[in-house]
Image: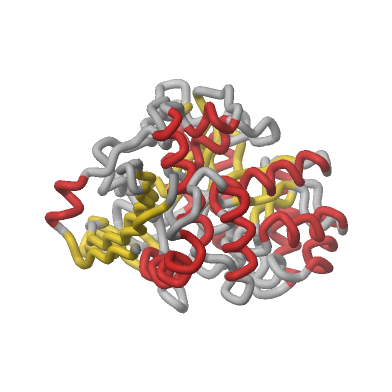
Amino acid sequence: MRISEVELTEFTYELESVGTAGANQVHQVYDPENTLEPTGLILTVRTADGTEGHYRSITYGELIRTHVEIAAENLLIGRDPLERESIWQDVWRTFRHTDHFGLGPIDVALWDLAGRHYGESVSKLLGGWRTELPAYASTFFMDSAPDGLNSPEAYADFAEECLARGYPGFKIHGYPEGDVETDVAICRAVADRVGDEMDLMLDPASGYRTYREALRVGEQLDELGFYWYEDPMADTGQSINASKNLTRKLDTPMLGLEHVRTGPFGRADHMTAEAVELVRADVHQDGGITGAMKIANVAEAFGLDVELHIGGPATLHCMSAIRNSNYFEHSLVHPQGVDWMNQQGFLESPERLTSEGTIAVPDGPGLGVEIDWEFVNDRLVDRTVIGR
């Protein structure tokens, strides 16, 4: 079996009542007067006998396209798609100057193809055993809408609502770009309301600009008994020393490395230096399912937990086979029901929360989800087929 074609299908979809905020307009917030229309990408890897594997982008579809086009002709066409590790190593080396960005989508598509070839789910191929995964509610950033997440009290109200829906955990994305006073007030309000009943997390998304700001917020989280403190400071993703100082000073476990693309290798350096206590991995941006499992195995060897970033079916399958992982990130959620992780492009959403606060791992062949080609073709932007 050989890869005969790589197909890239670009389409648009709509995020209603969603806008952007922050200095660089990178944080998405609730905005009832706005609709975003991002571009989605479906990567299809196809063999001569018609076996296919798919990846549906969650973010950065345009960047993924460029990287896959670079890899397709020289690294994919003519290869055995079941030799995922060999392909992973070749693409990792080729993309070493560009943060390995396109590797994740390629790897996920190859795992989907393998599952369809063998008639088994990716979870089964990985040796997975967890069929229901506990999920935490991961909020939008703070907004200014009258009916939005516009105050500490609004966050506390929403946390209570999420508790009633079954979520065992609640993660706060606070003021866009980070504001110490606001974020501390939000954390206090939420802890006062549900702190005895939910695991609470804070993710400033590397928003604090100084070590003192990050330390001050962390000291408040220690008092409130937070479950983790995630990527607080602008350079903690890169600076081992800054991260190490925070982990030494604070009791709340530090979760880090979402914003760097070093794979298992750079993460091992942070773990060796005791500069991180919980480790982020992302199937979309950290080398796919193969890359995320490598990171999880390294973390396990260090006696640390790995927490997977954002969702999608590949994340569910990965987590099903990882012992040292606690929560699935169900994001981004908001009291007005806006859905940043809108799964337009799939026939059914792979992320359906149960009353027990869990999300089921799809059990069909491959990723266990099907592309909604009618929707995709109706909103088609471009289709490119690379093959020989």
- Left or right of residue 182: residue 89: right
Q: Residue at x 20, y 53 (%)?
A: 376
Residue 100 position (above or below residue 170): below
Looking at the image, which residue is at 30% across and 56% down?
146
Residue 7 visible in the snapshot:
yes
Residue 161 visible to an observer of this rendering: no
Residue at position x 57%, y 55% in the image: 87
Note whether 124 is above or below 78 in the view shown: above
Q: Is residue 81 found left or right of 61 in the rendered image?
A: right
Q: Nearer the viewer, residue 33 or 216?
A: 33
Image location of residue 190, percent across then percent down: 54, 43
- Decide if residue 124 is on the left or right side of residue 342: right
In what quadrant of the picture does the N terminus appear? top left
155, 66: nearer the viewer: 66
Q: Position of residue 235 (x, y in %)?
A: 69, 72
For residue 321, above or below residue 372: above
Q: How is the image coloured?
A: secondary structure
In terms of depth relative to the viewer, which is nearer, 276 or 11? 11
Question: Residue furthest toward the left?
Answer: 378
Q: How many marks?
A: 0
Please name the residue shown 64% across and 43% down the image. 293
Indicate the position of residue 225 as horizontal and vertical percent values.
Answer: 71, 40
Q: Position of residue 13 (x, y in %)?
A: 23, 57
Position of residue 178 relative to residue 270, above or below, is below
Residue 202 as seen in the image, left or right of residue 375: right
Q: Quadrant of residue 181?
A: bottom right
On the rendered image, what quadrant is the C terminus found in? bottom left
In front of the other: 359 or 123: 123
Looking at the rendering, which quadrant does residue 224 occupy? top right
